[in-house]
């Protein structure tokens, strides 16, 4: 694996679990433009002192998840899995960031 030292520890832990069971490579959840969600979310949480979560409540595979900021509903977002079973959200990072900032700037 390339560049594991720059990745968050939880990423490496997920890969270790996959390696143990001979599963495909782990890639962190990402937006439709291949930007990792944790990079965008952690920056927004830091800038706005908030908590942003992607939440699936009693969902089935093809159903959308919710995005919540400080437990308040923001929007629904579609999701799919790549060939290795890694999550891809159906929104680009700039669109996600803008929606979050609009909500946070009005509160």
Image: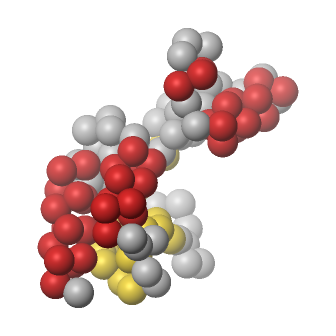
Residue that appears at 17% across and 77% down: 105
Quadrant housing residue 50: bottom left
Residue found at the very far top of the displayed protein: 2
Quadrant housing residue 26: top right
Relative horizontal placement of residue 58, taking residue 82 as reference (left or right):
right
Q: Nearer the viewer, residue 42 or 82?
A: 42
Q: Which scheme is used to colour this image of the protein?
A: secondary structure
Q: Is residue 69 visible?
A: yes
In the image, residue 5 lies at what x, y percent?
Answer: 60, 22
Residue that appears at 30% across and 75% down: 75
In the image, residue 28 lies at what x, y percent?
Answer: 51, 40
In the image, residue 17 lies at what x, y percent?
Answer: 78, 34
* The N terminus: image quadrant: top right
The answer to whether residue 75 is above or below residue 88 is below
Quadrant housing residue 85: top right
The answer to whether residue 13 is above or below residue 106 is above
* The C terminus: image quadrant: bottom left
The answer to whether residue 31 is above or below residue 46 is above
Residue that appears at 53% across and 25% down: 6
In the image, residue 7 lies at what x, y percent?
Answer: 55, 30
Q: Is residue 88 visible?
A: no
Residue that appears at 16% across and 62% down: 98
**Figure disc tally:** 0
Relative horizontal placement of residue 78, taking residue 10 as reference (left or right):
left
């Amino acid at each position: 694996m390339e560049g594991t030292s720059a990745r968050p520890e939880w990423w490496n832990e997920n890969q270790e679990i996959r390696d143990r069971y001979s599963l495909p490579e782990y890639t962190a959840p990402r937006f439709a433009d291949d930007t990792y969600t944790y990079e965008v979310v952690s920056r927004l949480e830091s800038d706005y002192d908030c908590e942003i979560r992607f939440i699936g409540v009693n969902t089935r595979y093809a159903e959308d998840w919710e995005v919540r900021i400080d437990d308040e509903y923001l929007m629904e977002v579609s999701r799919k899995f790549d060939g290795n079973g890694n999550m891809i959200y159906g929104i680009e990072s700039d669109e996600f960031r803008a929606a979050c900032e609009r909500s946070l700037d009005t509160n």
